[in-house]
Image (cartoon, rainbow, N blue to C red):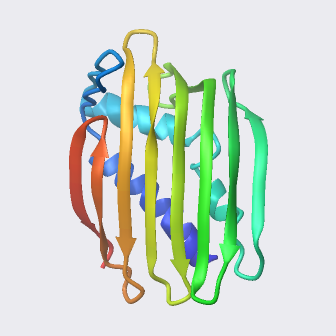
Amino acid sequence: MLTHIRLSRTLVAAVLAFSAACGGDATSPQLSLTDAESAEMFSTLFGIGGFDGGTALKIATPTRDAAVNLTVNCPAGGTAVVTGSSTDGTTGTSVSVTQQYNNCKNTAMASGKTWTFNGSLTFAGTLQTSGAVNATMRGSVSTSNGTKSGACPIDITISLAASGGAGGVTGSICGKALSGALGG
């Protein structure tokens, strides 16, 4: 379970650390955020319930397969539908969870702004018995906070070694490339 918690915290920390101005995609208006707004958006998104404490990781248990299919009310209105499963294998546990946001609203703690999210994110990972972790978060959300709105595609890959937890994060958030070292 420690690896599960470590992966969840690492994923959130990596996203917050590397989030920056979003660029949008070809079919949606461009979302342009300051670094502070971007960090606020991601912390508000992850505070909704699916990826904050790691629904993907909570359903993964070391001794059995598990599945989840639930609809949760978002803190300030709307819903999020969480579906997924974990499969226990001889070398570790594989996890795949998708969270679909439907006018899902959450209020940022620091600014008090309410953010609305639509779209989906999929978290997939392998939590090896050795302690090594390989995970991805992919999808796209459209978001607004009353003054700004637009699309934000997310494609993140995280790898952590079994020994010492050193690894890295690569990918992009809102069209902005990210790359960096983790742990160690």
Residue drawn at (77%, 37%) of the image:
71
User: Which quadrant of the view contains residue 47?
Assistant: top right
- Relative side of 127 to 82, left or right: left
Residue drawn at (46%, 31%) of the image:
141
Residue lying at the far top of the rendered structure = 147
Count of numbered badges drawn on the protein: 0
Give the x, y percent position of residue 59: 71, 63
Residue drawn at (60%, 59%) of the image:
96
Residue drawn at (77%, 48%) of the image:
69
- Relative side of 170 to 40, left or right: left
Position of the C terminus, as image quadrant, is bottom left
Position of the N terminus, as image quadrant, is bottom right
Relative height, residue 74 to residue 168 (above, below): above
Give the x, y percent position of residue 117: 53, 25
Residue lying at the far front of the rendered structure = 27
Residue 48 can be seen, yes or no: yes
Give the x, y percent position of residue 125: 51, 66
- Relative side of 119 to 157, left or right: right
